Image (cartoon, rainbow, N blue to C red):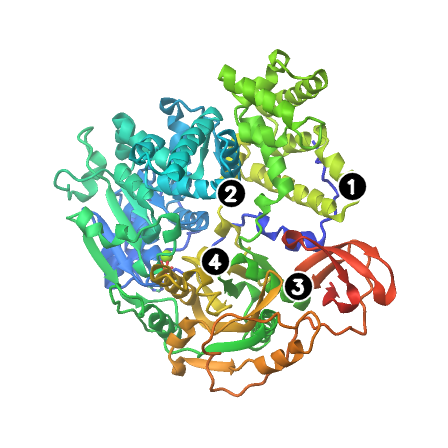
Amino acid sequence: MTSLFDNLPLTGALAADTATAHSAVTADGARLPGLVPPREDAQPEPVRGGRGRDAEALLEGLNPHQRAAVVHSGPPLLIIAGAGSGKTRVLTHRIAYLLATRRARPGEILAITFTNKAAAEMRERVEALVGPPARAMWVSTFHSACVRILRREHAVLGLRSSFSIYDAADSLRLMTLVCRELGLDPKRYPPKAFIHRVSDLKNELVDPDAFAAGVGGSNPYEENLAEAYRMYAQRLRQANALDFDDLIMTTVNLLQAFPAVAEHYRRRFRHVLVDEYQDTNHAQYVLVRELAGVATQAYDDGGDSDLDRGPAPVLPAELTVVGDADQSIYAFRGATIRNILEFEADYPDATTILLEQNYRSTQNILSAANAVIARNPDRKAKNLWTAAGAGPKIIGYVADSDHEEARFVAEEIDRLGDASGVRPGDVAVFYRTNAQSRALEEVLIRAGIPYKVVGGTRFYERREVKDAIAYLRAIANPDDAVNVRRILNVPKRGLGERSEAVIAAYAERERISFGAALEAAADVPGLATRALGIVTEFARLLADLRAMAAGGATPAEVLDSALDRSGYLAELRASDDPQDATRVENLAELHAVAAEFSEADPDGDLGDFLERVALVADTDQLPDDDASGGVVTLMTVHTAKGLEFPVVFVTGLEDGTFPHARSLADPAELSEERRLAYVALTRARERLYISRAAVRTAFGVPHELPASRFLDDIPDELLDWRRAESSMQQLRGSWGSGGVGSGRVRSGATGGTGPRTAPSQATGATFGSATPRADVPSLDVGDRVTHDAYGLGTVVALEGAGSSQVAKIDFGTDGVKRLLLRYSPVTKL
Ligand SMILES: Nc1ncnc2c1ncn2[C@@H]1O[C@H](COP(=O)(O)OP(=O)(O)OP(=O)(O)O)[C@@H](O)[C@H]1O
Ligand SMILES: [Mg+2]
């Protein structure tokens, strides 16, 4: 079957826009000198032959502490160590070593990593050692492991195996419906706040009954929350759906409520290994405990004899967890470093191994990171050292504006390429919040430097992509009310809200799903004839598509059919709004993702595809490290966890940006920001740049921001300030002279404006001034432009001509603006 999207030209803008769609999962070039390379003549199961040599080779190049961790056997093992000390490497080698020495079969291993990327890397390396049997190993994120368990055990929970996984947006939508149904005033009881609380409760394993029982009768907010939580859980169940937090909580419930199921997994997984343990939340902590089993008897220290274990009793699995309390950066999601700090108390016979040598970074980088984290109170001091030598000094830069900062980054990437052979793929640029990527993107586009944004406005969150996925979900799971309702009138079929409400009420009364009510539309009282016709046709469409999926059509084929037969694609194509053209391109991209999926996994059905879509984590969308030199990676610090790059730029080091404004008055949050800074700095292997902008534009308003307090902690001798002083006075001068700029510079706070030593080579202000410009750009509808404050946009209409020409420009999330071109800092791309 040919695709609807065949021959569709993919524009450069699309390539930049939807770059985040691909889940290129490749190793990031980390070197592993101690791991045996794949042999040309690799036997399918080298586990059986020559394993002594394999095992020995795995220990080469490890330091004595790392070795001890790799060969350790018996009681739970905790490895706590600073960044870059080889924790993840030890985990990988340990798995390989367990296999090479026959202490475990691949199927007996469960490894939990923080990202799918790390999982893929681990599997790849183990596969290089043992060949195809590596596939029997479970290496995955917490969420993926739980989905796998739940898909197998769904029956005991009364779920159908086709259950849907609701993402954050779906969950919010459902909570909004619930709150509306309960008649709660959204101002006093915002669904968003409720959904956050529900997520926290689930991470603490508090179910609706337990929560309701704990709520006293005197707090209406909590009472309403309890009611909403209960109904939300009910609706999820009716929709045969689980939200993200449910995946963990439901698995824990399953293991606790069904001892036979728990025993099955305990028998199966003899080795449970967890990376980034500091970021596990309570539910994940309990999950690990349930899967591994708790020691109630002495450990069998029998080495090889493990494989001959008799049927009962089930000994606890060998548990290995690795982490770094200084890198705990998910407290806001319920992660608790208590897990790591009290591991020894929870597992009294645990062995702890410390790793102190850092193999990733130069001494200068490490010293800077150590200086920043050292100021956190209540932490155990560490002795992290490196044999790598001092390396180049850290380069600092104070820019006048965020745009100028971006320009510095681009120029430096160019210069490094020319002078030191640094490839774009070697470089990562970090920022605190997604919104900061915009200025960087504009400049990189203009400079012709290839890049990808990891995270940000995620491809899967775009409206058209969500609509298309909603079709697929509704096809895969007829009970999925949120998704069926999402597409009920998309594209517009002329069905009103009243008709939808009538059907919903009927479903509720008859205790059937919304989807089932659609199919029984003829029996729904109060449905107008016209509406009945529309609904019947819609139900038939879904039924046909379901039959198609059941008949073996690939996900890409089902997608094409859905978009075609629903009229969705035709509507977009008929539109003259240029944004709709981009939407068609994004759908083509989704088609490509689905086709790629089928290529990689020819037996994968629609459910498998949706599962993958649901579980794609931001960090999976890392660029290919291809032969052409790769592309620069732009990402938030959160998504950079566990990764490393030869060259790192940490941007936006201002008080109010990083540390985040929200944290300035709260010591606990400030400590978390400091850990985040430690994560950022320790990603760098050879070169580290730190920069800030004296004035940063947020939501179109420029703010004057003082230097980040973290900058003050880095000793002067480690730093080479390329440019230390901002030309603030100059800026004030140009803005103070009237026009729109006047009075718009807001002072963030008093305080230092950065190190004051190096000579300034200020280049002056670069952003929008209110003076008319001589060269009004000549624009056409459909042109891509950048605006100094709003960023990337598309011209959707033009009015007038010459010096009075006004352009209507769509700036995506910033909305559509009407701009008098003569006064607007707009550049055509
Ligand atoms: N003994 C060693 N010899 C050579 N290189 C090593 C050794 N141990 C680790 N490395 C390298 O050091 C780098 C950091 O290792 P790894 O990513 O495992 O550290 P980590 O402790 O997991 O870091 P993070 O805390 O950031 O997750 C990697 O490139 C790894 O290959
Ligand atoms: Mg790691």
The image quadrant that residue 826 belongs to is bottom right
Q: Residue at x 43, y 33 (%)?
A: 228
- Packing grade of label 4 (10 A; few <14, some 14-19, many >=20) is some
Distance (Cα) linking label 4 and label 2: 46 Å
Q: Earlier in the sequence, mark 2 or mark 1?
A: 2
Tell me the mark number nearer the camera, choosing from 3 and 1. 1
The answer to the question of whether label 3 and label 4 lie on touching residues, with beta carbons closer than 8 A, is no
| Amino acid type assigned to the residue bearing label 2 in the image | Lys
Q: Is mark 2 within 8 Å of ligand 1?
A: no
Q: Which of marks 3 and 1 is nearer the N terminus?
A: 3
Q: Earlier in the sequence, mark 4 or mark 2?
A: 4
Q: Residue furthest right?
A: 801
Image location of residue 432, percent across then percent down: 48, 61
Relative to 798, is 690 above or below? below
Residue that mark 3 sits on: 445
Residue that mark 4 sits on: 28
What kind of element bears circle 4? loop
Distance (Cα) linking label 4 and label 1: 42 Å
Residue that mark 2 sits on: 187
Residue 773 or residue 386, whichever sits in front: 773
Q: Which residue is drawn at 26% across and 67% down?
A: 382
What label does residue 575 carry, if any?
Answer: 1
The answer to the question of whether label 4 and label 1 lie on touching residues, with beta carbons closer than 8 A, is no
The answer to the question of whether label 2 and label 1 lie on touching residues, with beta carbons closer than 8 A, is no
